[in-house]
Structure formats: structure tokens, C-alpha cells
Amino acid sequence: MTTHLAPPTARRGGAAVRHLLSAADLEGLGLPRLLDRAQLLRTDRATIAPSRPLAGRQVALLFEKPSLRTRVSFEVAVTSLGGHAIALGPDEVGLGRRESAADVARNLSRLVDAVVLRTFAHDTLVEMAAAASIPVVNALTDAEHPCQALADLLTLRQRFGHLAGVRLAYVGDGNNVAHSLMLAGALAGLDLRVATPPGYAPDPDVVATARALGERHRAWISLGTDPVEAVTGADAVYTDVWTSMGREAEANERRARFAGFEVNESMLTHAATHVVALHCMPAHRGEEISAAVLDGPRSLALEQAENRRYVQEAVLIELLATR
Ligand code: CP
Ligand code: NVA
């Protein structure tokens, strides 16, 4: 994969249009500032959103795959900041079928102030951003889920008080969530240990980008196939579904290949005693995570879900209200 980085920015009114397509884009958008703003939006809202910073702004939410958290948290984010959200499902727009992503982008650019897109191929998102003169935000593609990673960093920072050096093990599929977590984790200076079954490793281009970012931000990123090795001494353990949306036909084969990768009480005995468990949800209890861990006292899954709203509010303010 070579297209996860931002395309050339369009210009609107002389100013470059900024997008959030990849977690790597969080560097240019000011990751520390976004996290600080999101934290204020959660705990001290009056200081940052006394007026309605998105008043008069229209945001299209275009979802080609199912969603609970992303769809709802974006609509709550937009409306609670004074803006208006227009949710569009796959059958309404027919992205790439009824008309091209570029034409959808050009038309939406004349009608709304930003587009939030969940789609399959990452190239569709990139095509839309390249043709748009308004910000485009990635709400999940097959390659990345940057808004999730931003919420995950906020959740870790709330728990540990800092991010640099926090030891995070990711156990499971080297998928969109893993990709964005690696890129965002690299920017945050995490000590990130990824364990995937053979054949399910993260995309080598993403790994190379994450390592390059990590060198500049003092992150450590290791890859392997042994979940116990990754989890040993970890402050936090993260997992995601073994079968992502769009790959349902592979579910049985994946269940077999991912044997031994369930994040359960036994696996967590190798982690630090204060270990916390993360999952972006939806979750499959008894597959990638046990019910005891997901529903137990170490789970931060619902904190992650709530933080989706605040980080997305912070992103929307950055893209729409600060310039
Ligand atoms: N974690 C997440 O993105 O959830 P949804 O697919 O429900 O939006
Ligand atoms: N990797 C999962 C994440 C869901 C939020 C998927 O793409 O289905």
C-alpha cells in the first residue's frame, strides 16, 4: 500500500485544505494540540466550546459500511458544536457506482463544509480528497482508522498521564486499526509491540512509515508472531476483530489461524500488574477477547468509545473552525 499519506492539498480561498486520511496526518494537524483540546472538551467543556464553533457548518457523513460508534459520535460531535450533520448511506450515494468519488467530492464541496467518509478501498478516500476543496476525514477504510487511533491515544493518556514510553501490545490482525495505531503510536512515542499470526502482519509500507515517524518521536515499534512475547510487561493490551468488514468469507479460516491470539486472563498474566485492555469494538467475546477481560475492570473499551466524540470534535474544530 502506498497511498495512505495525504494527497496534494486542494486550495480554497487561498488557504490549503487539510484532510485527515491517515493517522500519519495527525503530525501535521498537531497531535498534542488535538489531544489537549479533546481532553478539555471532555472535562472542561465550557473553556473551549462556550460559543458554537461549528455554527452554520454543514458536515456530510458518508458511510459505505456499517457503523455504530463512528457514525453516532460524529453526528453528536457536529451537532453539539453547533453544526449540522447530513448522514448518507451507501444506497443513497452509490459512491463509485452512481458516480465517481471525484464527482461526489466536487459536488459536496459546493454544498457542505466537510466530508466524513467510511469506505472500502483507501484509494476511494484519496480520490475524494484529491478532488475536494473541503476537508475530508477518514471514518475507516480497509487500510486505516485514524479517528479510532486518536481516541485510543487519548484513552491511554487519561489512564497513564502521558504517552511517551507507554508499552502497548497489539495482538491480532494487522489490519486498519493496527495500521493507524502504529502510525499514531509512533507520533506519540509509544513502545509498541505488535503480534500477528504468520501471514497477517501489518502492511510493510505502513510499518516503514511508522518506523520513520517513530525515529523522530522516540517511539519503539516491534513486530512478531508471538502474542505472549508482545504482551510480556505491557502496560496496555489492544486487540480488534480477526475478520474485518468486507472479509466475512475468510472468517472460518481466520478463526483457525488466530488460535492462541485471544486476549484473555491467562495471556494478561504476562503483562504488568496494572495492565489495561483496549478494544475498538465491535467485539467478539470468545474469539479475539474473552468476556472476562472485555467486561472486566481492566477494560477501557467504553472509555475509547466515549472518547471518539471528543477527539472528533477536536479534529472538526481544527479543520473547520481554526482557520
Ligand atoms: N470502533 C468503531 O469504529 O466502531 P463502529 O464500526 O461501530 O463505528
Ligand atoms: N477492523 C475492523 C474495525 C471496526 C471498527 C473492521 O474494519 O471491520
Image (tube, rainbow, N blue to C red):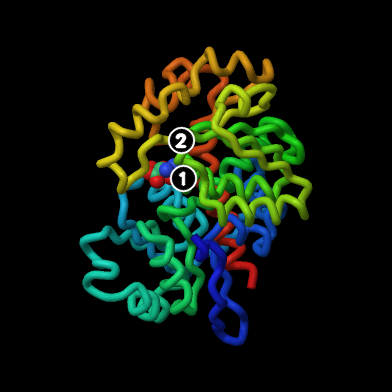
- Give the x, y percent position of residue 69: 41, 43
- Give the x, y percent position of residue 70: 42, 48
Please rate how many residues cluster around mark 2, counting C-alpha atoms within 10 Å: few if below 14, some from 14 to 19, many from 20.
many
- Give the x, y percent position of residue 213: 70, 55
Q: Look at the numbered discs 2 and 1 and tell me whether their residues touch, using CB distance below 8 Å.
A: yes
The residue labelled by disc 2 is 240
The residue labelled by disc 1 is 175
The amino acid type found where label 1 is placed reads Asn
Can residue 291 be seen by looking at this rendering? yes
Q: Residue at x 39, y 30 (%)?
A: 257
Q: Which of label 2 and label 1 is nearer to you?
A: 1
The residue lying toward the viewer, choosing from 93 and 185, is: 185
Secondary structure category for the residue under label 2: loop
Quadrant of the displayed image that contains ligand 1: top left
Secondary structure category for the residue under label 1: loop
Label 1 within 8 A of ligand 2 by Cβ: yes
Can residue 36 be seen by looking at this rendering? no
Q: Residue at x 55, y 41 (%)?
A: 307
Task: Describe residue 92's horizontal placement relative to residue 31 as left or right.
Answer: left
Q: CA distance from mark 2 to mark 1?
A: 9 Å
The residue lying toward the viewer, choosing from 34 and 45, is: 34
The residue lying toward the viewer, choosing from 254 and 59, is: 254
